[in-house]
Image (spheres, grey):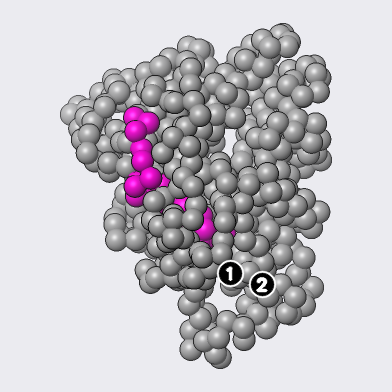
Amino acid sequence: MRLKYILCISLFSLLSCSDDFVDVESKDENSENYFNSEADYQSALIGAYDMLQSTYLNVMLGEIASNNTLAGGESATDVIGIQQIDDMIHTPINQQLRDIWSWMYAGVNRVNYIMEFQDKTDFPNKNNVIAQTRFLRAYYYFELVKWFGDVPLVVDTRIFFGDQTELDRTPKAEIYAQIEADLIFAANNLPYVQADVGRATRGSAEGLLGKVYLYQSKFQEAAAVLDDVIMGGPHDLVSDFSTLFENDNENNIESVFEVQYTDLEGASFDCFQCSEGNIAVGFNGPRNFNGPLFESGFSFNVPTAEAYEAFDEDDLRRDFAILNIELFAEQNQDYNNGAGVSWTEGFEHTGYFNRKYIPRQGDANIGDQNLTNPNNYRAIRFADVLLMAAEAHNRGIGNDGLALTYLNRVRERAGLDPLAVAGSELTNAIYRERRLELVGEGHHFFDLVRTNRAAGQIDGFVPGKHELFPIPEIEIQLTGNRWEQNPGY
């Protein structure tokens, strides 16, 4: 028999799609007869990691919801749910929000499947396996809290259809407490370097824990744990920013945690979460592109001129973070025997593309090339850690000297002069640097929300409503309408 555990449609429906939780030999279909060896736990853990690949959507929509990018695409009706989020007119009936909810809970359920049987079999490496498992649970729940606020919190047991009649939304303070506990355990039981590339490490757990603290304005706690990553771990800034997001420079010294993608297994539009490739990369690429270095995409998630112009002219990051397609064409006039570079302008064409995550030439692109790009997502970078630590020291501790040191390390790598500011001026400098350093990486909307700046910078943003996204209507209906919807929806 083969053990297949699937959660693809919603939190409360175990319905078939083509993505298996794990596909391994087993003597019995009954999952209670599984987890008899370390190999069983490792196979289940790989399945729990697998749902990270679906977070491409979280990243892309995190940019589109902000003032960094526009939805783009082919037309105003191309993936209407994305267009609605861009315009801040989204409702509880939105396929992309339902996908985020469903896929993050699929990750939670895969993790809880392991935790339900955590005590069944002992082996020498078990603390490492359980620590990775709890890191992943924290990661998935953090995404759910960021997007939806109060959500059902279930730990160490699977969620089955029918449980919705008894499950309530858990206050986010309780969810944060569980996230913190999971990450503290992970940090205490993981090494800084794992034998297998891509696995969570102590730095991964501490980096995410620092971010979780920062989102709750627990500045002293954030500063302490982020300082530990900076001073005690093996991470540092890559010296040349221009190479940072290339496929041959993945899992480098700056990568605190990286979501792994591959182009060795194709996908289809029938099951996006089945793809082993980074789907957002194909969505971000220029439409019908013909030229060097890059490949075509669907022209979604296009940076605004304002985001491009926010960079100083001498900022080394600008042209390696955002592709100015007109400038690129001018620089490659001799391409194809003088024919030059060509592309098709999509909806809301700005002339800019997210260069960090657009398709590169040379990929295998098995299946549909727009769905199987191998570009890893740099989920937590050391530059992010430095800037989070700078914010924590500045806003919560008053240690502006250390905050400035951290900030200027990031600026120095960008070729910029060091700053000498303090207080609120330093706070605003840190906010600005986070936007520039992390543009295109899905963080900006949530940074604006957690610092109460969103209403002044995002067109259509309604305070008291748009800090959260609506719970998918189908999920509320499956509870018998027991849950209240988020305010304003």
Which secondary structure, mark 1? Answer: loop
Determine the residue located farthest toward the left in the rendered image. Answer: 339
Expressed as whole percent of the image width and height from the top left, the position of residue 183 reads 72, 51
In the image, is residue 291 above or below residue 234? above
Using the numbered discs, state the Cα–Cα distance from disc 1 to disc 2 in whole angstroms: 7 Å
Taking the spot 29% from the left edge, 61% from the top edge, the residue there is 270
Magenta stretch in the rendered image: 86-108
Which secondary structure, mark 2? Answer: helix
User: Is 358 included in the stretch rendered in magenta?
Assistant: no
Taking the spot 55% from the left edge, 86% from the top edge, the residue there is 30
Q: Is residue 470 left or right of residue 176?
A: left
Prevailing secondary structure class for the magenta stretch in the rendered image:
helix
Determine the residue located farthest toward the bottom in the rendered image. Answer: 27
Residue 301 lies in quadrant: top left
Taking the spot 66% from the left edge, 27% from the top edge, the residue there is 387
Three-letter amino acid code at disc 2?
A: Glu
Expressed as whole percent of the image width and height from the top left, the position of residue 441 reads 50, 36
Instruction: Find residue 439 and name its label.
Output: none
Expressed as whole percent of the image width and height from the top left, the position of residue 316 reads 52, 20
User: Is 104 included in the stretch rendered in magenta?
Assistant: yes
Taking the spot 55% from the left edge, 29% from the top edge, the residue there is 449
Q: Which residue is mark 1?
A: 158
Q: How many marks?
A: 2
